[in-house]
Structure formats: structure tokens, C-alpha cells
Amino acid sequence: MWSCARKRDTNRITSARQRHKSLASIIFLFAETGNIRRIWGSNSDKSNSEAIGLRCDVTSWADQLNLFQTAFDAFGSVDVVVANAGINETGDYTTPKVKDGKLEKPTMTTIDVNLMGTAYTTHLAIHFLQLDRKPDDVLNSSAGLDGTASWQPAATGPMYSATKCGVLGMTRSLAYPLVQKKIRVAVVHPFFTDTALLDTINRVLAAGLAFVPIERVGGTIILAATDRDMSTTGAAWVLPDGGPLLRLEGEAIKGGVYDILTNRAMQFEA
């Protein structure tokens, strides 16, 4: 998880340029400590960056709460949250195991990290993004890093695909109620990127295909997190290959009872 925060002072950060610079500091910290590869230009100015690194098990509510509280205590606010922790498929869901005549519980680690961990992060973000807010503050944002398995399920990863569809569904569901709290949400879906998460099987499957440069993933996260247009909240930002970035609005079944239910839900939330 990344969080972007500002120090509490009289000159509150409001411009997109300043927010970009703050977020770049956090990104550099994670890149340089080895958790992810560098996703910001090598010629960026880091001389004035300030960041804190903290080990966190995203499946632990206590660890995540401590992470958010540490950021808030250090900087006085939390402005942008990015849920980026994720792992590949663990175990073999399609091959049940029997031990001593009893069916064993399937491995749910992928669900715990990719979906439950993101749900914890998002819940904490909703709370901390509202602390120390001023009436004239710009919108605060929460973004999730998902994958194209939300749109094209991975045949080799049923649990992985389930988590990605779950994150997309959660983001869309949260979009309208969080407008009332001046919080934007977004989800970023990159195609394969050349990271340690890409295992041998997937590298073979993706042979000859254009990977998405990690720099573009980072840039898309920043774009999604700093877009002030509330009409784009809940949107999916998709990098399907090495080509253009796509912003997809949430499709839904419309007409008849579905429109009635949607309108009633919006009035209830208002």
C-alpha cells in the first residue's frame, strides 16, 4: 500500500503538481527499498522528498491500522491511498486434496492478500482520508491496482481472477456513496508487466506480446489518483497492452427494475 500525505502546516497542498511531487517521493521510497521496481523517471528531482517505509502484512488488520496511523501521525493527513499489494495464484483450487480420508481446506492465501487486504486498505482509507479536512480541500483519492483478469479471467488462476473481479466490483459499488464524503475511487488494470509477480507459466503464455512498461503503470496510478473530475470516480483505467490508456466507465444492466433500484439507492445515500 502507498499513501501520499502532506505535513501539517498553514500552506496546505492543493495543486495537482504538488500532489504529483509528494506521491513521487513515496514511489521512490518503495522502489529503492526493493519492494517494486522504479516506476518514476530517472531524471526526477528527489532531493526534497520525504517518506517513511514500514513493513506491513496486508492480511493483518492491526498491521494496516498501524501503517495508516503512522502516516497520519508523521504528516498530519492522508491524501492519496493506493492498494497495490498482490500475489499470484496459490495452491491448486481445481485439485481437491484428501488427507486421512478427509477433504482438506483449500488454500485461500490469494483471496486473503488480493481481496481481503484491499478491503482492509479501502476501509482504512475511507476513515483516514476524512481526517484533518478543510472546507476548501481538493478531493482525496483511493485507488486500487487490479489486473486485466477482471476482464479476461485467467484460466490458470481461478482465485486470482475472483479477487480481481472483486476489487473492480467493490470500487464501482463505492463510487457513489463516497462522492458524499468527497472521496474519489478508481481501479487501475495493467496487462502483464515485467515484475517478479510474472511467473514462468505466464511468461510462456505471454511470449511475443507487448508488456506494459512499469513507468506507465505508475503514471496511470498518479493520473487516476489526482483527477479532480468526480464524474470519473469508480472508473476503470485499463492498460491492455503497450498502446493507449483506456478509461472505462462502469457498465451495468439498465432499464426497468434496474433503473428503479439504482435511483432508489442513490436517493437513499443522498
Image (cartoon, helix red, strand yellow):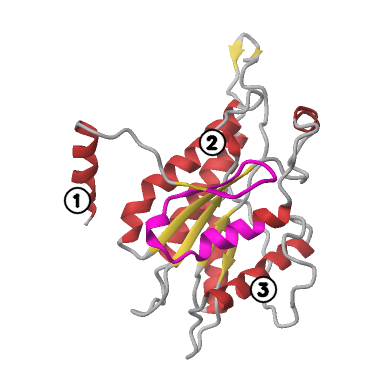
Q: Which residues are magenta?
A: 218-246
Q: Amino acid at mark 2?
A: Ser
From the image, which quarter does the N terminus lie in?
Answer: bottom right
Q: Earlier in the sequence, mark 2 or mark 1?
A: 2
Q: In the drawing, does residue 108 fall left or right of residue 214?
A: left
From the image, which quarter does the C terminus lie in?
Answer: bottom left
Residue furthest to the front in view is 244
Q: Is 33 situated above or below 77?
A: above
- The residue mark sitting in front, 1 or 3, is 1
User: Is 222 inside the magenta-drawn segment?
Assistant: yes
Q: Position of residue 166 (x, y in %)?
A: 48, 38
Q: Earlier in the sequence, mark 3 or mark 2?
A: 3
Which sits in the foreground, 71 or 138?
A: 138
Q: Is 235 situated above or below 129?
A: above
Q: Position of residue 124 (x, y in %)?
A: 46, 58
Instruction: Kindly identify which residue carries mark 2.
Output: 150
Q: Amino acid at mark 3?
A: Ala
- The residue mark sitting in front, 3 or 2, is 2
Q: Is 8 situated above or below 4?
A: below
